[in-house]
Amino acid sequence: HARAYERLGFVKSKMQEHEEAIEYLQKSIEIHPAFPEAYYGLAKIHMLDGNLEQAVLNLELVIRHAIALQAIYWKARKMKAECLVQKGEWEKAAFELSLIVKRKFKAGDPNIKSLPHGYYLYGKVLLKMQDEDGAINWLEKAVSEAKDPELAWVKDAHQYLAALHEPTHPGELETDKD
C-alpha cells in the first residue's frame, strides 16, 4: 500500500497539487517509514516550493534508506547537491558532487544522463572554492559530454571557461545568480 500512496503523491505533484501530494507521500511513509521514493517525492516538492532546508532533510532520509546500488540513491545525492549549491553551502555541495562525478555508473543507469550537469555543478562549486584548476577540469568535461549545447548551464560553462582562460578574470560572472 505504501507504493500506491507514493504513486498518488507523484501524480498529485505532477498536477501541481502539492498539498495533496504531501499528504499522500506522508501516508506512504506512515505505512513504510523506510521507503526512499516517498522521501524523494517530498524533497522534490519542497525544492520546487523553495523550502531547501526541508528538501535536504528529506534527501538525507532517501540516502539513509536507499542503497548505493539503487538509482534513487544517486538521484538524491545530486538533488541534495543542487539544494546546497542554491544555499551557497559550497563545501557540502562539493562533497556530494565529488561522490557523484567519481562514481562509475553501469550502462543503462538513469543517472548517466545527468552526469554532464553534475560535472558542471562540481566545476562551478570548485570555482567558488577558489580551485580554478579543478573547476576548469570539470567544466571542460561537462561541455564535452553535454548532449545539447543550447542548454543554459552549457552556455554558462562556456562563459566560465572563457573567463578562466583569460590572463586576468573576474571573480564573478554575469551568469552567477546563486
Image (cartoon, helix red, strand yellow):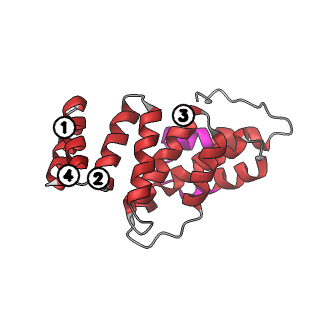
The residue segment tinted magenta is: 141-157
- Please report the residue visible at 30 percent of the width from the left and 53 percent of the height from the top: 37
Instruction: Point out which mark residue 2 bears.
Output: none
Judged from this view, the residue extending furthest toward the bottom is: 106
Q: CA distance from mark 2 to mark 1?
A: 20 Å
Q: Which residue is mark 2?
A: 33
The answer to whether one can see residue 143 in this image is: no
Q: Which residue is mark 3?
A: 86
- Tell which of 42 and 30 is nearer to you: 30
Is 53 rendered above or below residue 131?
above
Label 3 sits on what residue type? Gln
Label 4 sits on what residue type? Ile
Q: Nearer the viewer, mark 4 or mark 1?
A: 4
Q: Which residue is mark 1?
A: 12
Q: Of the two numbered discs 1 and 3 on the same chain, state the one appearing first in sequence.
A: 1
Q: Of the two numbered discs 2 and 1 on the same chain, state the one appearing first in sequence.
A: 1
Q: CA distance from mark 1 to mark 3?
A: 25 Å
Residue 39 drawn in magenta: no
Image quadrant holding the N terminus, namely bottom left
The location of residue 146, given as percent across then percent down, is: 52, 53
Q: Decide if residue 71 is on the left or right side of residue 123.
A: left
Q: Of the two numbered discs 2 and 3 on the same chain, state the one appearing first in sequence.
A: 2
The location of residue 157, given as percent across then percent down, is: 62, 43
Instruction: Point out which mark residue 31 bears.
Output: 4
Q: Nearer the viewer, mark 3 or mark 4?
A: 4
